[in-house]
Image (cartoon, helix red, strand yellow):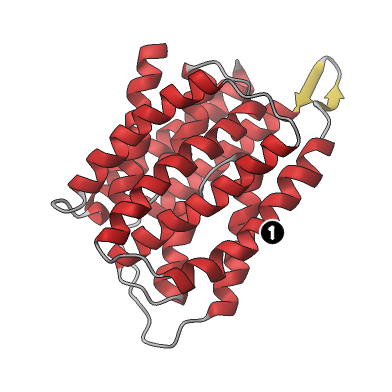
Amino acid sequence: MEYAGYFASIIIGISLGLIGGGGSILTIPILVYLFKVNPEQATSYSLFIVGLTAMLGSYSHYKMGNLKLKSALYFAIPSVISILIIREVIFPQIASTLFSIASYSVSKDFLIMIIFSVLMITAAISMIKKNKPEVSTCSTNYMQLSIIGFVVGIITGFLGAGGGFLIIPALLFFANLPMKQAVGTSLLIITINSSIGFAGDLYIGTPINYSFLLSVSAMALIGMLLGSQLSKKIDGVKLKPIFGWFVLVMGFYIITKEVLF
């Protein structure tokens, strides 16, 4: 299982490098089911892995001229605010056991995995859709961009997911960026969000196994390098439906496993 986990970690990076999102959706299931990490701690690990991997990818896109800093900041600043509220104020207050019905208890870990599986299914549907979003010709709507940024921050804070599947459409529709620039700018936003979220976890004293975390991150970074190179030759948009079907199956697998087993 551990070897499978390290191999799967490469896919996290490839997905982020190639299509600017989706890789973070896989991080939590890989950590929980292949590495047997506690779901709550996995959200912290995911922030580090995704943030570090996205940082390398955003640098590669910066060299290719695909970063739009103003749009990234209008999106990222509200995201950071909501991430800190979720990670440092709300998340620690959620009890380990939420409620019990007869002999069946609903735990915080169960809630995390169920919400995450719903997020995976939602992300998968958006990736499977064949209609390609078209860039609007109107001026950039920074207010709507910031509102969506705040919402994505809530998702990132609670689940440790980068939210690339939400960020890219927002950048296409409200920042009017071409697909390549939306991918590069999305990676920068994911870097900022994940880094702040992980730093907040360190501040409140979340226990971290650094040797394990760095080894998984190293594999994801290898994947990111591969994905960034492939993005020069392969249209990531064409691969999204294939990846979407994979994420969809994973989402339903998690629901089945958590509810029935």
Question: Which residue is under mark 1?
Answer: 81
Left or right of 25 in this view: 43: right
- Total numbered badges shown on the rendered structure: 1
Q: Do we see residue 187 in this rendering?
A: yes
Q: Residue at x 53, y 37 (%)?
A: 48
Residue lying furthest left in this view?
233
Q: Do we see residue 1 in this rendering?
A: no
Q: Residue at x 70, y 29 (%)?
A: 206
Task: Classify 41 as above or below 242.
Answer: above
Residue 34 at x, y percent in the picture = 46, 17
Residue 176 at x, y percent in the picture = 39, 77
Residue lying furthest bottom in this view?
138
Residue 122 at x, y percent in the picture = 50, 49
Left or right of 90 in this view: 70: left
Left or right of 37 in this view: 86: right
Q: Residue at x 37, y 36 (%)?
A: 12
Quadrant in which the N terminus appears: top left
Q: Residue at x 62, y 59 (%)?
A: 79
Mark 1 lies on a secondary structure that is helix
Left or right of 98 in this view: 77: left
Question: Crowdedness of circle 1 by 10 Å Cα count: few (<14), some, many (20+)?
Answer: some
Residue 214 at x, y percent in the picture = 46, 26
Task: Classify 256 as above or below 187.
Answer: above
Q: Nearer the viewer, residue 157 or 120?
A: 157
Q: Residue 255 sits in which quadrant? A: top right
Q: Nearer the viewer, residue 80 or 42?
A: 80
Name the kind of residue labelled 1 in the image: Ile
